[in-house]
Image (cartoon, rainbow, N blue to C red):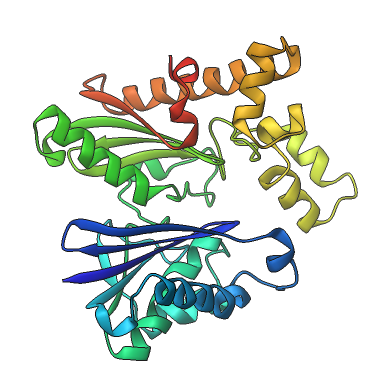
Amino acid sequence: MKILVINPGGTSTKIAVFDEDKEELKVNLDHEAEELAHYKSITDQMPFRKEVILKTLTEKGYKLEDFDAVCGRGGMLKHIPSGTYAVNDSVIEDIKNHPYGEHVSNLGPYIAKELGDEVGIPSFFVDPVCTDELEELARYSGMKGFERQSFFHALNQKAVARRASKQIGKAYEELNLIVVHLGGGVSVAAHHKGKVVDVNNVKDEGAMGMDRAGGVPVCQLIDYCFSGVTHKEARKKFGDQGGVFSYTGTKDFRTVENKAFDENDEVCMGAFKAIAYQLAKDIGAMSAVLRYNVDAIVYTGGMAHSERFCN
């Protein structure tokens, strides 16, 4: 079986071709900010990204008819358990109207179905960001009606958890793991015998990310929201201009690390240490969730390439 895999990101679209479990092709298609800027919404980008994919496949010697299925990165849909799902009309309706939120990952199933329908092959998505396996106790917050939500980097978390389990020599369903996704956004999750029973997601809480604020003091947040800013401005402030960026002015982790250690930049060193400190606290909290019976702590994502940071 030959499968086309699509992973849309904020400024790129990654595609890969697999023949069974053998990777035949992997391409990262970068998009200039100017190319995407004139689209009013993320879903409006679909035709542009689709054409870029088709052009690249042609250049690499592939036709859509060569594939048995198309699989796209899963987006912000209704909460569902981990797994592989067919893309149906209800999924596309939720992506277009985005009642659960608009995110670039929503383009994955959308593009997959568009391409699949052209040649009559099925389209799928796997472990979307809305994957929900939380224990009931984990849903409680500190206020009735404010239920904690399961939104996290499920696709990567599940994949590396299975890879780590293989290295340990046991089945994923036999182990207790803490997985830490270290990208522009961060998430720390407790994997209990094959299920993510609790998670801190920078979208709402926990450690800050490179541009997301994570958990901030509630009273100060309330005061800010009533200081004359609009709803849109507040969401952008904490979801796109927060985190390490708010301290250093850059969203590039490598720049922060280089300035901290090579240029003795005190601001960057403070931010570098702070995000590590906050992530360590979240890992400790997930250890408690697993009753301190932890087989491994697993790091993944761009920042995981920094040995200094992981140490």
Residue depicted at x 70% and y 38%: 242
The count of marks equals 0
> Depth check: 193 or 222 in front?
193
Q: Could you say where residue 213 lies in the image, as x and y percent from the top left?
A: 65, 37
Q: Could you say where residue 220 lies in the image, as x and y percent from the top left?
A: 77, 32
Q: Could you say where residue 170 lies in the image, as x and y percent from the top left?
A: 9, 33
Picture quadrant of residue 122: bottom left
Picture quadrant of residue 10: bottom right
Say left or right for 51 vs 85. right
Residue depicted at x 56% and y 61%: 103
Residue depicted at x 46% and y 71%: 56
> Depth check: 257 or 22 in front?
22
Q: Is residue 213 above or below residue 287?
A: below
Question: Is residue 100 something that shows in the picture?
Answer: yes
Q: Give the residue furthest to the right.
A: 228
> Depth check: 176 or 71 in front?
71
Q: On the rendered image, what quadrant is the C terminus found in?
A: top left
